[in-house]
């Protein structure tokens, strides 16, 4: 079993839809959870960061962490064609340790 | 604030040749990471530096890969000799001590033919 799993997609949605992206993980020691967006031929760009369980909202983006289920989600409201990218979840156990990434979900938002 | 700088952006070499990548992290970021991202996969850590010391190089293929960060600022990753399976994007990232986020450069796309 991989440490971090993510549905690779591709996921295609119409403009304006609510998008749900998810990751599951196996190591209960993970405490810091990130979502990165990666456009084609670009480096990953940090979108959201959460610590432990709970929700965090930033504009159209909401990140949720459920540590009891080892499940994290990113919701995108009112999706736009500019949101078309690969979304990577990443997590780490504590400060100073490296990040473990999921394989990414490719999202296409159709105008 | 300037981001993480990497060069070159693209490199094509023949197998068995050597290649080097350069990274300059965000100013003040003590932690520097090199990741390998194969097409369709998430980034995989190769090596992590804290200042000029190695924190984690457990996944670095040390028979062919080497990395250094001599003055605790910029870093070089080298592959010698390259294999076909080294074709990937090599990403450099940096983070500030005490903060959980890491910021990535644009990456170097390596093609080994």
Image (cartoon, grey):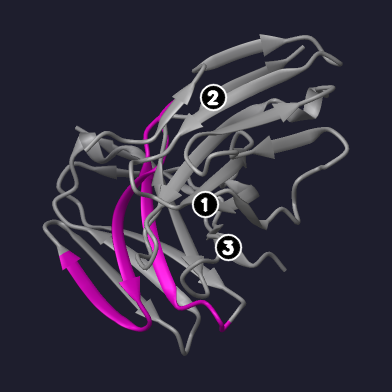
Give whichever of B32, A72 is nearer the camera. B32
Give left or right: position of A18 versus B81.
Answer: left
Residue A77 image-quadrant placement: bottom left
Mark 2 and mark 3: Cα distance apart in space: 25 Å
Residue at 52 percent across and 71 percent down: it is A24
Mark 2 and mark 1: Cα distance apart in space: 22 Å
Q: Which mark, residue B108?
A: 2
Marks 2 and 1 in Cβ contact (< 8 Å) = no
Question: Which circle, 2 or 3, is nearer the viewer?
Answer: 2
| Residue with the mark numbered 1 | B51
Residue at 77 percent across and 35 percent down: it is B65
Q: Main secondary structure of the magenta part?
A: strand
Element carrying mark 2? strand
| Residue with the mark numbered 3 | A5
Query: Which chain is indicated by disc 3?
Result: A
User: As drawn, which residue projects farthest toward the front?
Assistant: B71
Element carrying mark 3? strand
Residues packed near mark 2 inside 10 Å, few (<14), some (14 to 19) or many (20 plus): many
Looking at the rendering, the stretch of residues picked out in magenta corresponds to A28-57
Mark 3 and mark 1: Cα distance apart in space: 31 Å
Residue B84 image-quadrant placement: top right
């Amino acid at each position: 079993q991989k440490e971090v799993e993510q549905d690779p997609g591709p996921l295609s949605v119409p403009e304006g839809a609510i998008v749900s992206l998810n990751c599951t993980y196996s190591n209960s020691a993970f405490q810091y959870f990130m979502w990165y967006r990666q456009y084609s031929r670009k480096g990953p760009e940090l979108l959201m960061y959460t610590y432990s369980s709970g929700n965090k909202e930033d504009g159209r983006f909401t990140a949720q962490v459920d540590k009891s289920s080892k499940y994290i989600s990113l919701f995108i409201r009112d999706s736009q064609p500019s949101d078309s990218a690969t979304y990577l979840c990443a997590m780490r156990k504590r400060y100073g340790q490296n990040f473990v990434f999921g394989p990414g979900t490719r999202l296409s938002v159709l105008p | 604030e300037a981001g993480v700088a990497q060069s070159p952006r693209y490199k094509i070499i023949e197998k068995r040749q050597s290649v080097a990548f350069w990274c300059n992290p965000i100013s003040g970021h003590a932690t520097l990471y090199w990741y390998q991202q194969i097409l369709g996969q998430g980034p995989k850590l190769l090596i992590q530096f804290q200042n000029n010391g190695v924190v984690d190089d457990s996944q670095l293929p040390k028979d062919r890969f080497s990395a250094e960060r001599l003055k605790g600022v910029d870093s070089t990753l080298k592959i010698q000799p390259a294999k076909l399976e080294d074709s990937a994007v090599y990403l450099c990232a940096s983070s500030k001590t005490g903060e959980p986020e890491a910021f990535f450069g644009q990456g170097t796309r390596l093609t080994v033919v």
